[in-house]
Image (tube, rainbow, N blue to C red):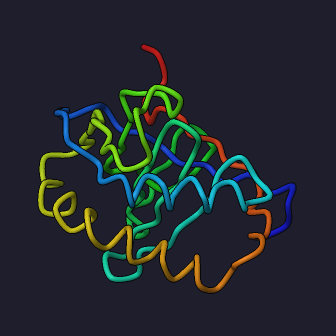
Amino acid sequence: MTAHDTQSFFTPDEFSCQTFRLLSKTYNLAHVLLHRSQSDHLFVPIRSLQYLAIIEKNTFWFVDSLAYAVRGDEGGRLIRLSWHPLLKPEQRDDLTQPLDCRLVFYGNDMKDIQTRLNSEFYQAMLQIDQRYKDSLPASGKISILPLKTGL
């Protein structure tokens, strides 16, 4: 992929949401890697789940690599879960403080995936951390869109 390519990802309708606590080590490593990235987002393949995580400054998106959708004439992968930290980084008392997040499910069968993501996402980031100590290559542009257009 070249730096000018744009990949599309779709968010289906929100199925449910809840609050969960994100471990500080996961949040901290995600932002260390994002800082190394030459983009404003970072792709993290989670091969054990066949998922792709997209890290942005204030959101973690989790994409099912096997789920594809089309909206109009545009196709893209489906986002199945997202994590939205409720505190801004500067509002944390210290770096060891876990973060409460809004967890959004975009399907009714995602609780098992969420349970596995808690450990597998961190492990996938550790692999990237070991492979790219200085900087991460640019990963093109992304477009995150609602699956349904306004009615």
Q: Determine whether, in the image, residue 23 is placed left or right of residue 68.
A: left
The answer to whether residue 21 is above or below residue 13 is below
Q: Position of residue 130 (x, y in %)?
A: 59, 84
> Residue 114's image quarter?
bottom left
Q: Which one is in front, 12 or 73? A: 12
Answer with left or right where residue 35 lies relative to residue 15: right
Name above or below for residue 28 compared with residue 131: above
The one nearer the camera, 121 or 76, is: 121
In this view, which residue lies farthest toward the front?
A: 94
Q: Kindly indicate the quadrant of the structure image that contains residue 23.
A: bottom left
Q: Nearer the viewer, residue 82 or 67?
A: 82
Residue 36 image position (x, y, % from top left) = 72, 62
Q: Position of residue 123 (x, y in %)?
A: 38, 77
The residue at 42%/58% (across/down) is 63
| x then y, percent, for residue 32 | 60, 58
Q: Quadrant of the C terminus?
A: top left
The correct choice, above or below, for 71 with respect to 113 in the image is above
Residue sitting at x 51%, y 58%:
30
What residue sits 51% from the left and 83% below the top? 127
In terms of image quadrants, where is residue 5? bottom right
Count numbered badges in the picture: 0
Taking depth in this image into account, of 139 and 5 the one nearest to the observer is 139
Q: Quadrant of the N terminus?
A: bottom right
Spot the residue most to the top. Answer: 151
